[in-house]
Amino acid sequence: KLAKESATGKAQFSRNEGAGKNETWDADGLTSLLKQMFIANKNFDNLISVAANYDELPSYVKNAVKKSAAIQAFVYGKRVYMLADQIQVGQELPVFLHEVGVHLGMENLLGTANYRKLAGQLLLVLLKNE
């Protein structure tokens, strides 16, 4: 699915119509937090780019992705781009997991063992919160 989406040159987006109404992230803080949570930390910089805002994206990405106040993050090619100023504090993990898990394919990125480890950790959190 990823190759088919990439071949079309279209990006896949996470949107939040309410972004910017509450406290949002700066690029360094969001990058630091996500790196702490990312199981395959050595691959983070190869897969994830966190920009302070749309204007900080590389020009080739801006040429392919139209500016919108509703875009929090998107996948273009084989990379996740996150716009820190559009992601509310407390929403970073759902946005990140959506982009990586849905659009990039988390098991393919993490490998089966790490994917199962993450799934087990998420299950424990869910069971704990019931």
Image (spheres, grey):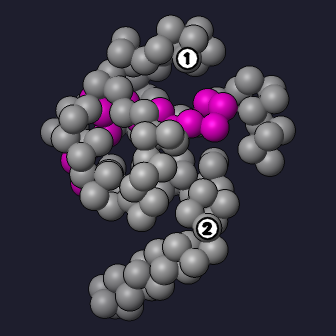
Q: Is residue 130 above or below residue 37?
A: below
Q: Quadrant of residue 51?
A: top left
Q: Is residue 66 visible?
A: no
At numbered mark 1, what does the secondary structure look like: helix, strand or loop? helix
Give whichever of 130, 98 is nearer the camera.
98
Rendered image: mark on residue 61: 1
Magenta segment: does it hold 86?
Answer: yes
Q: Is residue 65 visible?
A: yes
Disc on the earlier residue, 2 or 1: 1
Q: Secondary structure at mark 2?
A: loop
Query: What's the amino acid at mark 1?
Result: Val
> In the picture provided, is 130 more to the left or to the right than 103?
left
Task: Write the residue at 56% across / 72% down.
Answer: 115
Q: What range of the chain is rendered magenta?
A: 76-91
**Relative vertical location of residue 57 with respect to residue 59 in this rendering, above or below:** below
Residue, disc 2: 111
Residue at 24%, 46% (x, y): give it.
Answer: 32
Residue appearing at x 80%, y 48% in the figure: 1
Please tell me which residue lies in front, 89 or 62: 62
Location of residue 118 in the rendering, given as x and y in whole percent from the top left corner? 47, 75
Looking at the picture, does residue 100 appear above or below residue 53?
below
Residue kind at label 2, given as amino acid type: Gly
Dot 1: few (<14), some (14–19), or many (≥20) neighbours within 10 Å?
Answer: some
Give the distance between the C-alpha atoms of the residues marked 2 and 1, in whole angstroms. 28 Å
